[in-house]
Image (cartoon, rainbow, N blue to C red):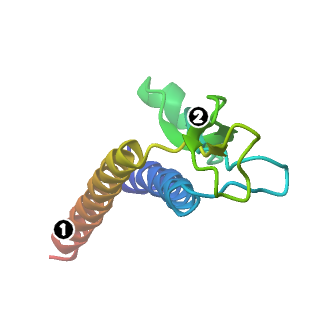
Amino acid sequence: MDFFNSMNVSSSALSAERTRMNLISSNLANASTTRTPEGGPYKRKDAVFAATPMKTPFAGMLDKASNQDIRQVEVMQVIEDQNPPRLQYDPSHPDADAQGYVAMPNVNVVEEMADMISTSRSYEANVTAVQAAKSMAMKALEISSK
């Protein structure tokens, strides 16, 4: 794997983790949203990642030559959590039903915060990988110029 392929793989992971962080932020921001344009409470969203082959013109030749299958990260889809909303008793709420229960979003703030930490760590790891590849490339240039 050359320097550019390793940077491409890490940059695809950075993009995927950025999408995941945006979804987590949206989930946290809407943790108390009881009305949406679709009707009902907000539904938690999550990203589905997949390892896909590199999309560079020479990736196929490189795979055959090095007998490796280089893959990058891609967000395949954004899904809505199908768990039912949690019911909270609040008869004074404008969206309360006849029994006084309000359908609240299926967002668990603690779980979202744990996902946020995981996403942040993954992002940092990929930034470090890009920096290492860049440093190696710069050192190789220094060697060849001497």
Mark 2 surroundings within 10 Å by alpha-carbon count, few (fewer than 14), some (14 through 19), many (20 or more): some
Q: Quadrant of the C terminus?
A: bottom left
Which residue is at 18% across, 68% downward?
Answer: 139
Residue at the spot 75% in from the left edge and 56% down from the top edge: 35
Q: Is residue 66 above or below residue 56?
A: above
Which mark's residue is nearer the viewer, 1 or 2? 2
Q: Position of residue 97 (x, y in %)?
A: 75, 42
Q: Residues within 10 Å of mark 1 (few under 14, many from 20)?
A: few
* Residue 43 appears anywhere in the view: yes
Residue 100: percent from left, percent from top:
66, 43
- Residue 36 is drawn in which quadrant? bottom right
Residue 54 shows in this picture: no
Give 138 or 131, whichever is nearer the viewer: 131
**Which label was assigned to residue 79?**
none
Decide which of 91, 79 is in the foreground and name it: 91
Mark 1 or 2 closer to N-term? Answer: 2
- For badge 1, the amino acid type reads Lys
Residue 65 position in % (x across, y down): 48, 29
Residue 54 lies in quadrant: top right
In the image, 133: left or right of 76? left
Q: Name the residue at the top extreme.
A: 67
| Res 111 quadrant in image | top left
The disc placed on residue 139 is 1
Distance between the Cα atoms at labels 1 and 2? 30 Å
The quadrant of the rendering that contains the N terminus is: top left
Q: Amino acid at mark 2?
A: Thr
Q: How many discs mark residues in the rendered view?
A: 2
Residue pointed to by mark 2:
52
- The residue depicted at 51 percent of the width and 36 percent of the height is 62
Q: Are marks 1 and 2 in contact (CB under 8 Å)?
A: no
